[in-house]
Image: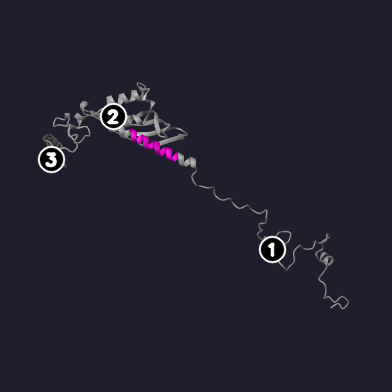
């Protein structure tokens, strides 16, 4: 021990290390120590380990914002309600058409409503359209109209709709059965009473086929809201009766022709 300084032998100095290495330039002292875990200028951690992870401070990575509110807005709820109301309107239109409930059918449209079914079949008012339907689809014609796959777009108090139609028309007097499909194109308006009504309707056929009932010798019409039935020769006739009236001899004959048990008819 050096008694004059009270220190042990010093470690080789800079000059000595320089001489030992043979370097001509001074060696810069290390930025990190062997102990204490101080990070050097190269980012190395203690004992030469790789860079330590950075600690996010005030300017660190931003935290992702919360997901936007997914709750429906009042306008989207209103659109859903309008689509439901228009769908119900279309279903009522079809039901009243097939049941020939003409007053209810007329109420599904505004007085100025138009209809287009081809270049040669167009109507410029609800009155003209209704008169045509009553004359051509009266009680001597049985119809079935079914619509699905609605595509409805709302624009405030107006809307448009596309519907896929499948229909059957049975005309016993003409010995004819018609089947077909089409796409309806409808326009709707919200009226002063708050209800939606049709301002324009019409469809374009994708196909249509017509069959003669004579090609179906086994066909028998065994039930009809309008009292139309077929006899053994396939001739259709109308039978009028009260809904709750007791079965008549004619009813029993019709049941027999249809292959039914007359005694099984409900009272």
Image coordinates for residue 188, horizontal then vertical, percent:
41, 31
Residue sitting at x 30%, y 26%: 133
Read off the magenta span: 79-93
> Front-most of 55 and 245?
245
Which residue does the numbered mark 2 point to in the structure image?
Answer: 209
Which residue does the numbered mark 1 point to in the structure image?
Answer: 45
Helix, strand or loop at label 1? It is: loop
Q: How many marks?
A: 3
**In this view of the protein, can residue 145 be seen by the observer?**
no
Dots 2, 1 in contact, CB < 8 A: no
> Front-most of 22 and 129?
129
Seen in the picture, residue 118 relative to 79 is either above or below; the reply is above
Quadrant in which residue 31 is drawn: bottom right
Which image quarter holds the N terminus? Answer: bottom right
Which residue does the numbered mark 3 point to in the structure image?
Answer: 262
Helix, strand or loop at label 3? It is: helix
Q: Residue furthest left?
A: 249
Sooner in the amino-acid sequence: mark 1 or mark 3: 1
**In this view of the protein, can residue 262 be seen by the observer?**
yes
Residue sitting at x 34%, y 33%: 93
Of circles 2 and 1, which is in front? 2
Sooner in the amino-acid sequence: mark 2 or mark 1: 1
Q: Is residue 20 left or right of residue 36?
A: right
């Amino acid at each position: 021990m050096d008694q004059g300084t009270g220190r042990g032998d010093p470690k080789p100095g800079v000059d000595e290390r320089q001489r030992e290495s043979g370097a001509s330039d001074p060696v810069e002292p290390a930025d990190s120590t062997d102990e204490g875990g101080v990070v050097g200028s190269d980012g190395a951690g203690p004992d030469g380990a790789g860079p330590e992870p950075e600690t996010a401070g005030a300017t660190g990575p931003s935290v992702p914002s919360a997901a936007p509110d997914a709750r429906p807005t009042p306008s989207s709820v209103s659109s859903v309600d309008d689509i439901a109301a228009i769908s119900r309107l279309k279903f009522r239109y079809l039901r009243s058409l097939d049941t020939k409930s003409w007053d209810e059918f007329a109420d599904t449209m505004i007085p100025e409503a138009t209809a287009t079914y081809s270049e040669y079949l167009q109507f410029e008012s609800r009155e003209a359209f209704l008169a045509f339907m009553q004359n051509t689809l009266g009680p001597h014609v049985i119809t079935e109209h079914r619509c699905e796959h609605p595509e409805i777009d709302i624009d405030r108090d107006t809307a448009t709709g596309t519907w896929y139609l499948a229909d059957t028309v049975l005309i016993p007097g003409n010995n004819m059965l018609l089947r077909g499909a089409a796409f309806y194109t409808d326009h709707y308006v919200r009226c002063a009473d708050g209800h939606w009504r049709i301002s324009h309707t019409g469809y374009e056929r994708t196909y249509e086929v017509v069959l003669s009932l004579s090609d179906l010798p086994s066909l028998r019409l065994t039930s009809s809201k309008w009292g139309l039935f077929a006899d053994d020769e396939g001739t259709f006739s109308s039978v009028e009766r009260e809904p709750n009236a007791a079965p008549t001899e004619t009813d029993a004959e019709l049941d027999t022709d249809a292959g039914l048990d007359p005694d099984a008819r409900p009272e």
